[in-house]
Image (cartoon, rainbow, N blue to C red):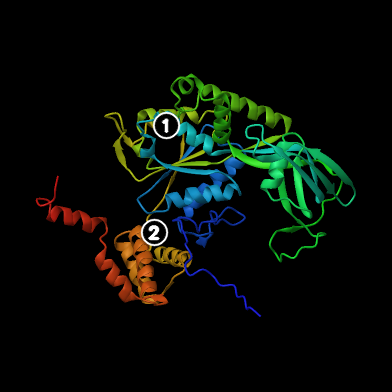
Amino acid sequence: MVEIEEIGSGMRLERIGAHSHIKGLGLDGDGRAKVVADGLVGQVRAREAAGLVVMMAKEGKLSGKAVLLAGPPGTGKTAIAVAMARELGEGVPFIQLSGSEIYSAERKKTEVLMEAMRKAIGVKIRELRKVYEGEVTSLDVKMGSSPYNPFIKVPQEAVINLKTSEEEKKIRVGPNVARQLIEYAISEGDVIMIDAKDGRVSKVGRSSEAFTFDLEAEQVVPRPNGPVLKEKEFVYILTLDDLDRMIAKRRGGGLFSLLLGVESKEIDPEVRVAVDQQVKEWVEEGRAEIIPGVMFIDDAHLMDIEALSFISRAMESELVPIIVMATNRGVTKIRGTDIEAPFGMPLDLLDRLVIITTEKYSEEEIGEILKIRAREEGVEIEEGALELLKKLGAEKSLRYSVQILGIAGVRARTKGEKKITKEEVEQVAQRFSDVKEAVDYLKKYESELLR
């Protein structure tokens, strides 16, 4: 007898995001922030303020406003923005871009911002469709010669017998559906759905009533209930940008694309107007629901006066996501002007922003953050190593200590060690410079470096 044993793969590829551990703002029922909760540590005042903003958004009272997170580098501004999106609910779109990403040689700045905004607005669409659903009890596909090549046989039609717990029906389908039946390898015992309008075939699984020799080869589902031909509600979520591109593609891309054979990289404003009108009609009919997401712009001070003016105007729109910006600048020039202003933003825009400030983490808070990151990256850390990383985070920066933690973890695994030791952290820290050390190095060897 042949022995068969299932084994895992020798290597598992993981991608751990910088904020993949964040589940929410970590607030209790009264809106007060817990010191450590939902992957966030400290920043109690900022998190409670963000919680109030989320409540405003849920009640639809954030219209005409945006949020500005201001604070030194490495104080959790991006983490709070991600947590706000998590608090709004599952499936809420979250789009992140840097203020410098809007500068493109191929597209206008305002087009990049408009696209990001529409990607951050979801549309939950509910649609009732007539479908044939049932277990296939018999299937006969008739083949014939292709009209383009008489030597090739292609499906011409098919006769299917579908059975539910209450009804059995025999239907004849055309070549399009017959081709899909062959493509999906539909056989007796499969549970399928066929869209009565466009003929799209979906394989639901293998009927539990059908006998099969394949153990767990396919998903086993019960035989459907009700009539074979029925109305079913389908729910799916698209963004406004998805709908824009679908309509633009259907229209063929406009005159520019038609004459030059080049697809336009920008969406025609008329397309967006048509999409907005269609979505409003769906909402009024009860077929759709708008899900405003979060558009997070990091390094917002890198946007120029034109882009900031566009943001200011967009805040007044009816279809707009929750706009959250972040900056680590103090009083600096507004890009594109000679005017100095707080955070590098026009005063009339600042006057309309809800400003949340963040503060530097204490050494104990840095320690809690490092523990969370260690768990997220699947590494263990000795107490002495943790104390040294806490000290590095307080003296240099939290980002530097998190980077050293990750590198030390890789080094420890390479050596076959289960825990990161203090010696590992010391050796890694000696090999990698923080920003201050790098600047000192540049000053020391300035005359020898290329300009």
Local SS, label 2 = loop
Q: Residue at x 79, y 55 (%)?
A: 189
Name the residue at the front extreme.
151
Q: Which residue is mark 2?
A: 361
Q: Is residue 222 above or below residue 141?
A: below
Q: Position of residue 382 (x, y in %)?
A: 40, 76
Residue 415 lies left or right of residue 296; in this view the side is left
Q: Is residue 23 visible?
A: yes
The answer to which image quadrant residue 24 occupies is: bottom right
Specify the amino acid type for callout 1.
Leu
Q: Judge the density around disc 2: few (<14), some (14-19), many (≥20) Cα neighbours within 10 Å.
A: many
In which quadrant is the C terminus drawn? top left
Q: Is residue 227 visible?
A: no
Local SS, label 1 = helix
Q: Is residue 443 above or below residue 374?
A: above
Q: Residue at x 40, y 30 (%)?
A: 107
Question: Mark number for residue 231?
Answer: none
Question: Mark number for residue 349?
Answer: 1
Whether the residues at callouts 2 and 1 have beta carbons within 8 Å, the answer is no
Distance between the alpha carbons at the discs numbered 2 and 1: 29 Å
Q: Position of residue 201 (x, y in %)?
A: 71, 43
Q: Nearer the viewer, residue 294 or 26?
A: 294
Specify the amino acid type for callout 2.
Tyr
Q: Position of residue 322 (x, y in %)?
A: 52, 39
Count of numbered circles in the view? 2
